[in-house]
Structures are given as structure tokens and as C-alpha cells.
Amino acid sequence: SSDVCSSDLTNKKDYTYREMDDYDGITTAKLTLRRSPSSSSTKITSIPKGARVEVEGKTSNGFYRVEYRDIEGYVSSKYIKLVRDYD
């Protein structure tokens, strides 16, 4: 997306990212949706336990990039149960 901060472009990424197709996720706990794949990253919103999210990809440092209610961000992959998306 076009809303990338210039500081995001200069930070060296210490993870790799892999896109995933055809998966949704169900949260197994209340999760914090974050701006980048780090537990210290800016919080965007909270996602309740049992919510369905669209999984867009996974980072090598243990986060999924997800979309929840038209908001994109990152959540810990430990608390997402993957399900096949047949839509």
C-alpha cells in the first residue's frame, strides 16, 4: 500500500516474508494487530478471540500479515489457527 512511512523504507528488515494464498485464520486468543511484525510495533487495533481474519502471508520471525475488517497488519502466528478459504 502507499501509506508506508519513509522511516520504514530505511530500516533493514531482519525477517523474510512469504505470501500465502487461500488461507483464513481463526484467532485463538485476543490479539493485537500491529503495524509491523514486531511485538514492540505500533498497535493498530485489537482482534477478539474467535474472530476470522484473512491471512495474506507469513514472516520468518513468527508473524502473519492479516486483514481484519478491511484493516491490514501483523499478528503473532502462535495464536492463529489456519483454515482453508474456499471462497
Image (tube, rainbow, N blue to C red):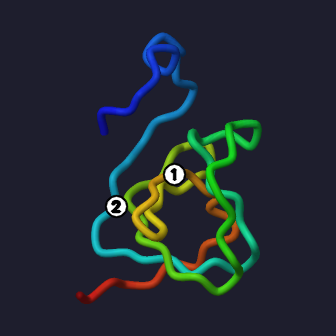
Kind of residue at disc 1: Gly
Q: Is residue 29 above or below residue 57?
A: below
Residue 18 x %, y %:
38, 48
Identified at 69% across, 77% down, the residue is 48
Q: What residue is disc 1 on?
A: 73
Image quarter where the C terminus lies is: bottom left
Closer to the chain start, of discs 1 and 2, is: 2
Q: Is residue 77 above or below residue 7?
A: below
Q: Which residue is mark 2?
A: 20
Q: Depth check: 19 or 65 in front? A: 65
Q: Residues within 10 Å of mark 2 (few under 14, many from 20)?
A: few
Extreme-top residue of the structure: 10
Task: Give the SS element for disc 1.
Answer: strand
Viewer-proximal residue among 46 and 23: 46
- Residue 20 in percent (x, y) is at 34, 61
Estimate the x, y position of residue 28 in percent, counting from the top left. 70, 80
Residue at point 65%, 70% (across, down): 47
Label 1 neighbourhood size at 10 Å, few (<14), some (14-19), many (20+)? many
Which is more toward the observer, 44 or 66? 44
Location of the N terminus (image quadrant): top left
Q: Nearer the viewer, mark 1 or mark 2?
A: 1
41 to the left or right of 82: right
Q: Is residue 64 left or right of residue 47?
A: left
| Distance in Å between CA atoms under marks 1 and 2 | 15 Å
When the figure is inspected, residue 22 is found, relative to residue 14, above or below; the finding is below
Q: Quadrant of residue 22?
A: bottom left
Task: Inspect the image, locate mark 2, and give the three-letter code of the amino acid beneath it.
Answer: Met
- Find residue 81 and report its horizontal and vertical position in percent: 58, 79
**In this rendering, position of residue 54 left or right of residue 51:** left
Among the 4 quarters of the image, the one containing residue 69:
bottom left
Say which element carries label 2: strand
The residue located at (57%, 39%) in the rendering is 36
